[in-house]
Amino acid sequence: MEREDGPEVDLHVHTTASDGTLELDEVPAAARDAGVETVAVTDHDRIHPGLDAPVTVREGVRLVRGVELRVDAGDLRVDLLGYGVADGTDLDAELDRLQRNRIERARAIVDCVEDELGVALDVDFDDGIGRPHVARAVEASDAPYDYQGAFDRLIGSDCPCYRPREIPTFERGRDLLDEACAVVSVAHPFRYPDVDRALDLAREVGAVERYYPYDRPVPVDEIERVAREAGLVRTGGSDAHDRRLGRAGLAGEEAGAFLARLEG
């Protein structure tokens, strides 16, 4: 759900370090365009290499070094958002391992697509690679599919060229993020098939993504109830993979409470 008054803080933004389209040096201008004062850069399974401290200020915009980590809770796979990532923790080695697996997986997917369609895909097998990179390469090739068609027919989870990737257990991911980050939050709880289970996991990490630009109405009163009962920190963000920051996030007292936790 988006805030009606516009957020000051957008805590869920992706860059070209994973599957976003914004370069890091473009983030401050995109934030100012959206009226956002604080942005968390939360690339998938990767800390942006251009951020050298947990919190920095660039061109008047506060940048929070974050990460979005997919974990396996046994009956549910969820995304955890870590904020204010410190240097020199065990999280670094785990993210390196996950990036190596992402590259291996991408090579296997590309090999399958090329064999399936008889086309050559132009893909750079670098850290941060994911299926969106493959889908963009499919769209740019001689294949008869656009970006969405690549997911629908080739590389989606039930498709012939899908390959799974390695992810840590919820417990390991939680522990690694707890050690490295000032705040850990469960991302977009209403995107999972079992919302109650996702909210139970939010109780365990201490924060929940309260504001998010869902593509359908969601019963946010349930998040509020759980957040009040469990004393959860509220987070929020646009999950931007493009330049459109500020579609969801925090403002006012909620923004202040998050920043105090981040800096405390």
Image (cartoon, rainbow, N blue to C red):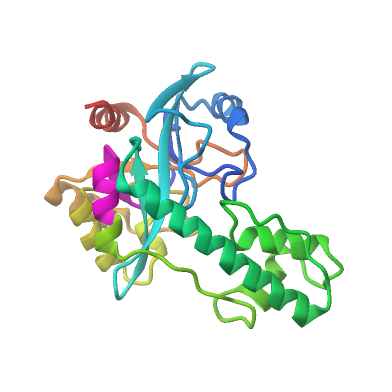
Asked if residue 217 lies left or right of residue 32, the reply is left
Nearest to the observer: residue 141 or residue 238: 141
Rendering quarter of residue 172: bottom left
The range drawn in magenta is 174-187
Coordinates of residue 77 in the picture (x, y in percent): 37, 68
Query: Quick check: is 214 in the magenta stretch?
Result: no
Rendering quarter of residue 52: top left
Q: How many marks?
A: 0
Coordinates of residue 175 in the picture (x, y in percent): 24, 53
Query: Residue placed at 27% from the left, 37% from the top?
Result: 182
Query: Residue placed at 64% from the left, 83% from the top?
Result: 160
Asked if residue 203 lies left or right of residue 78, the reply is left
Query: Residue placed at 62% from the left, 66% from the top?
Result: 106
Asked if residue 31 lies left or right of residue 221, the reply is right
**Residue that protrudes farthest toward the top in the picture:** 60
**Is residue 183 at all visible to an observer of this figure?**
yes
**Is residue 208 at all visible to an observer of this figure?**
no
Coordinates of residue 238 in the picture (x, y in percent): 48, 44
